[in-house]
Image: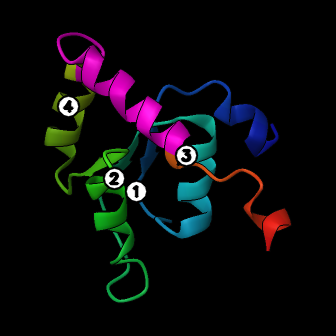
Amino acid sequence: MDGRLRLHCHEIMFQQSDTGPGTIAEALIKGLPIILNYYIPGQEEGNVPYVVDNGVGVFIPCPKETAKLVAEWFSTRAEELKKMSQNALQLAQPNAAFDI
C-alpha cells in the first residue's frame, strides 16, 4: 500500500527509527500526533525538541511507557491527543517545497 494512503488510516505517528524532518513533515500535514522513541545523535537530535516544544508529540524511549500513553490518549486523555492534532495541522507547511 502506498505510504500516503496508509497515513489516512492512522490516529498517531509512532516512530521507532526514522525521526527525520521528512517523516515529521508528513505527520504534521496529516495532523497526526507524533511519538518519538529514538533519534540519531547529532543528526536527528534537534527534531525531538521541535516536536515536543511545539506540542505536536512526545519523546518516550521506554516501550512500556509508550503503550501506557497510547492507551491513555484513546481513553482519559483524548483531549490532549486532539490538541496535538490541531497543533500539527497549524504547524504543517504542505506547500513548502513549492514555496522555495
Residue that label 4 marks: 69
* Residue 38 point in image, percent of width and height: 32, 65
Q: Which is the main secondary structure of the residues drawn in magenta? A: helix
Residue that label 3 marks: 28
Q: Is residue 54 above or below residue 39?
A: above
Mark-to-mark CA distance, 2 and 1 = 20 Å
Is 44 part of what is drawn in magenta?
A: no
- Residue 81: quadrant of the picture: top left
- Secondary structure, mark 2, is loop
Quadrant in which the N terminus is drawn: top right
Please tell me whether mark 3 or mark 4 is closer to you in this view: 3
How many other residues sit within 10 Å of disc 1, few (<14), some (14-19) or many (≥20)? few
- Secondary structure, mark 1, is loop
Quadrant in which the C terminus is drawn: bottom right
Please tell me whether mark 4 or mark 2 is closer to you in this view: 2
Q: Residue at x 28, y 17 (%)?
A: 79
**Mark 4 or mark 2, earlier in chain:** 2
- Secondary structure, mark 3, is helix
**Mark 1 or mark 3, earlier in chain:** 1
Residue that label 2 marks: 54
Q: Tag 1: residue type?
A: Gln
Q: Which mark is residue 16?
A: 1
Q: Tag 3: residue type?
A: Leu
Q: Are marks 3 and 4 in contact (CB under 8 Å)?
A: no
- Residue 27: quadrant of the picture: top right
The magenta segment = 73-90
Please tell me whether mark 2 or mark 1 is closer to you in this view: 2
- Residue 33: quadrant of the picture: top left
Q: Residue at x 44, y 31 (%)?
A: 85
Please tell me whether mark 2 or mark 3 is closer to you in this view: 2
* Residue 29 point in image, percent of width and height: 63, 43
